Amino acid sequence: MFSTRRRFLQASAASTFASRLPWPLAAAAETTKEAAVLIVIELQGGNDGLNTLISTQDPEYRRLRPQLAIPADSTLTVNPECGLHPQLRGFAELLERGQLGIVTNVGYDQPNRSHFESMDIWHTCLRGDQRRGDGWLGRWLQESPTAPGSLAALHLGDQQLPLALRSHAHPVPSIRSQEQFRLQAPNAEKLQQELLSAAAPQPSSDDLLGFVRSSTSTALQTSQRIQEIGRRSTTGTSWPEGPLSLKLQTISGLIRAGLETSVYYVSLGGFDTHAQQPDAHARLLRQLGDGVAALMNDLQDAGQADRVLVMCFSEFGRRVAENASEGTDHGTAGPVFLIGNRVLPGLTGTLPDLQQLVDGDLQYNTDFREVYADLLQNWFRTDSDLILAGNWKPCGAIRS
């Protein structure tokens, strides 16, 4: 009796320590190379789509932006009518390899120019008077029979969990870095080995004791595996500097480690460029392009690229005309970027018509829910109607 009680207390202590690790590591497990993964990069602040995907032929672009217009001969060619910002060299490389798709002029009816309200609309697919407590990806986690039951989604960043990931049935963890996966205690490595030993399966007729040991052992082993990513040699990829790159490097390591995670969510802020836009915007786009290119290179070298799709979006674009502070104000539509081996390379949709504006703003051509429907139906193989609260036709940017 005493021996059994002592083993139970040891296992319970181990479980207490393991519970301090981020939820739900106890359920994380290896997955197959065929499981689809989506990485969402949220460009916070309202990315200037007109200076990201640049018209090289439309004189209205240069007339309305005499200071901010990017010279046509410095853009990175997409087709004879447009090019990418010169700092998006990473995206240009992906396009050359057939891995970059651009859905043009994405927005929604009766656009809202508030950062918070517009982002909530993108996150939930609903207007303010229809507000729900969950997001479109959270609903996918709950409704899709293909969504894994363990660490199905993960948010990396300092901010609160994005509304898009909130679910009534699948809590999603939010972590700042790999360090959060580490057991926090003096002599943590020695302690972890002792806890693993205490939680190791042993013959016992006590079902509760066996459950505690099993759960604790799984949590600690998963923590060890994630920590090992930081010490493991990479596939030789050269990663750029910057916070976004660090997040994407962590995600690549987790994918290569085989975690059963279908959705990774990160953000890059700073796109609210009301003044002195050129240098700030260029720095942000370079972070984005170089970071995503490094991610895809790393996954390609590891044989994992076929099962990963990246989506980059912003809550709205900017006004067509520049302001008096060498910047742009809140606008409406903008491009959504999709990266992966199954995207339709180049443009899906048409370039914005700068002579057909509404109150100085772009008219959208593609509803953002049509992009989501494409992701859900052609990437995750899931019926999108219930998740998107309506019947939306896929935009056709992903090969089925």
Image (cartoon, rainbow, N blue to C red):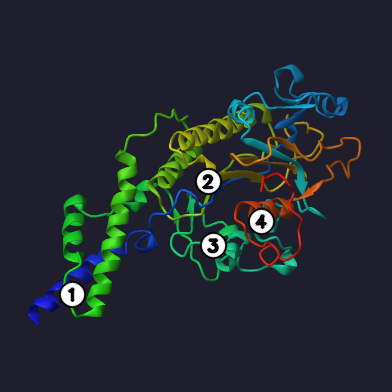
> Disc 2 and disc 3: Cα gap in Å?
14 Å
At 61% from the left and 32% from the top, the residue drawn is: 285
The amino acid type found where label 3 is placed reads: Thr
Q: Residue furthest left?
A: 2
Labels 1, 2: front one = 2
Q: Position of residue 141 (x, y in %)?
A: 55, 63
Residue 378 versus residue 55 in the image, above or below = below
Which tag, 1 or 2, sits closer to the chain's start?
Answer: 1
Q: Residue furthest top?
A: 73
In the drawing, what numbered circle is on residue 307? 2
Which tag, 2 or 3, sits closer to the chain's start?
Answer: 3
The amino acid type found where label 2 is placed reads: Arg
Residue at the disc numbered 1: 8
Q: Are marks 3 and 4 in contact (CB under 8 Å)?
A: no
Q: Are marks 1 and 4 in contact (CB under 8 Å)?
A: no
Residue at the disc numbered 3: 146
Labels 1, 4: front one = 4
